[in-house]
Image (cartoon, rainbow, N blue to C red):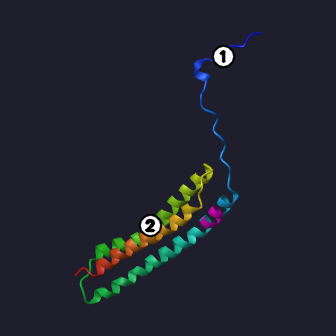
Amino acid sequence: MTYSLPPESFRTLRPEPAARKTRGWDVALTIVLLVLLPLAALGASYAGVLLAFAADACGSVVCDAGLMNTGFWLAVISPWVVFVLGVVVAIVRLVRHRLAFWVPLATLVGMAAVWFVAAAFVGAGVSAS
C-alpha cells in the first residue's frame, strides 16, 4: 500500500495557529465594568439635562438657542451612543480572546469628553450676544 502526498492546495508551510488563552481576570473585570457603565451613562445624561438651566441666563442677554439646543441634546443622547459602541467593542474583544478591560474605561472617558464638548456648545450659546 502506498500513500501519496496530498495535492499542492492542501500543503501548508505555516503551523497551526495556537489557541489564545482566556484570561479569567480580564473577563470578570470587563463584565463588572460593563455592568457599571450604564450608571455612568445615566449620570452623564442627567448632568446633560441640568445644562438646560444655562438658559436662565438668557433673560437679560441674547442667546443662540439653536446652539444651546444642540449642546443640550448632544449631552443627553451621546453618552448612550458611546455606551452602546463601548459594549459592542468590549464583547467583540472578549469573543476574540483579546484584552478587553480597558474598553469600558475608555468608554467612560469618551462619555466625559463628549459631555464636556456639549457643555462647551451650551456655554457658547449663552455667551453668543
Judge depth for marks 1 and 2 and give the one in front: 1
Q: Position of residue 68 (x, y in %)?
A: 33, 76
Residue farthest to the top?
Answer: 1
57 and 124: which is toward the camera: 124
Q: Position of residue 14 (x, y in %)?
A: 60, 32
Residue farthest to the bottom?
Answer: 60
Q: Say what amino acid the circle numbered 2 marks.
A: Ser
Residue ID for mark 1? 5
On the image, which quarter does residue 77 sit in? bottom left
Which secondary structure lies at badge 2?
A: helix
55 and 101: which is toward the camera: 101
Residue ID for mark 2? 78
- Closer to the chain start, of discs 1 and 2, is 1
State the residue at coordinates (74%, 10%): 2
Q: Say what amino acid the circle numbered 1 marks.
A: Leu
Q: Position of residue 82 (x, y in %)?
A: 48, 63
On the image, which quarter does residue 103 sit in? bottom right
Q: Quadrant of the C terminus?
A: bottom left
Q: Which residues are magenta?
A: 29-33
State the residue at coordinates (60%, 27%): 12
State the residue at coordinates (52%, 70%): 41
